[in-house]
Image: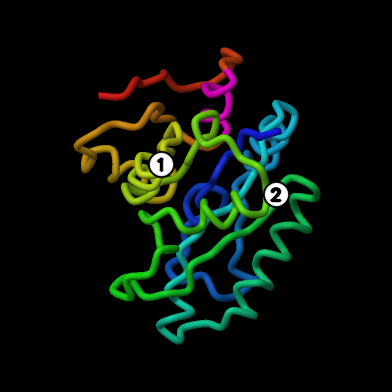
Amino acid sequence: MPQKAAFIDRDGTLIEEVNFLSRVEDLRIFPFTADALRRLKDAGFLTIVVTNQSGIGRGIYSEAEMHSIHRRMAEHLPGLIDAFHFCPHLPEAGCRCRKPNIGMLEAAESEFSIERRASWMIGDKRLDIETGFKAGTRTALVKTGYGADTCIQLTKGPDLIEENLLDVVCAMLDTGTAASSRQPAA
């Protein structure tokens, strides 16, 4: 039976933005991340991290270093992330996996039975929102990371714009506890 999924960007959404994060020591998980993921899991969502990691393709860090960061995230968020999918390619590589293309979402669908129309793409950049549009999911923009700047760049609005991931989740689940106001798509 198909499941709903929350496809979630990593940097600036789940964790603090660090340009080309390459060291576990520099990893900073937002204080609201665990609560947000727990609420998604309790509501029956798969939680799947989808992240562009061109630092690998640029030779800034290795795939092994990135996996170390993901392992640390999983340790600090036990049982709250179902899968990590990443694109190691450069932006000009033309691959299907780099957001805003939907290859990472398709890879997750081959791993899990996912109903896209019941799913969400959540992130802090325009390319995250464009990925959701292309995939046919609902979309949410967080104002953490690059999100505050992204708000003014969008020509087509996402389903939700909220201060952070927890506020997005509260609005998605309509619990009425989101601190910021809901902003409908333009």
Disc nearest the viewer among 2 and 1: 1
Q: Is residue 41 left or right of residue 7?
A: right
How far from the left and from the top, in percent, is residue 37?
67, 39
- Kind of residue at disc 2: Ile
Q: Quadrant of residue 123?
A: top left
Between the C-alphas of marks 2 and 1, the distance is: 19 Å
Q: Is residue 129 left or right of residue 76?
A: left
Q: Which quarter of the figure is the N terminus placed in?
A: top right
**In this figure, which residue is indicated by the disc labeled 2?**
81
Image point 58% across, 39% down: which residue?
6
Callout 1 secondary element = helix
> 10 Å neighbourhood of mark 2: few (<14), some, or many (≥20)?
some
Image point 66% across, 64% down: which residue?
70
Q: Earlier in the sequence, mark 2 or mark 1?
A: 2
**In this figure, which residue is indicated by the disc labeled 1?**
132
Range shown magenta: 166-173
Q: How is the image coloured?
A: rainbow
- Kind of residue at disc 1: Gly
Which residue, as the protein is rendered here, is positioned at the far front?
1
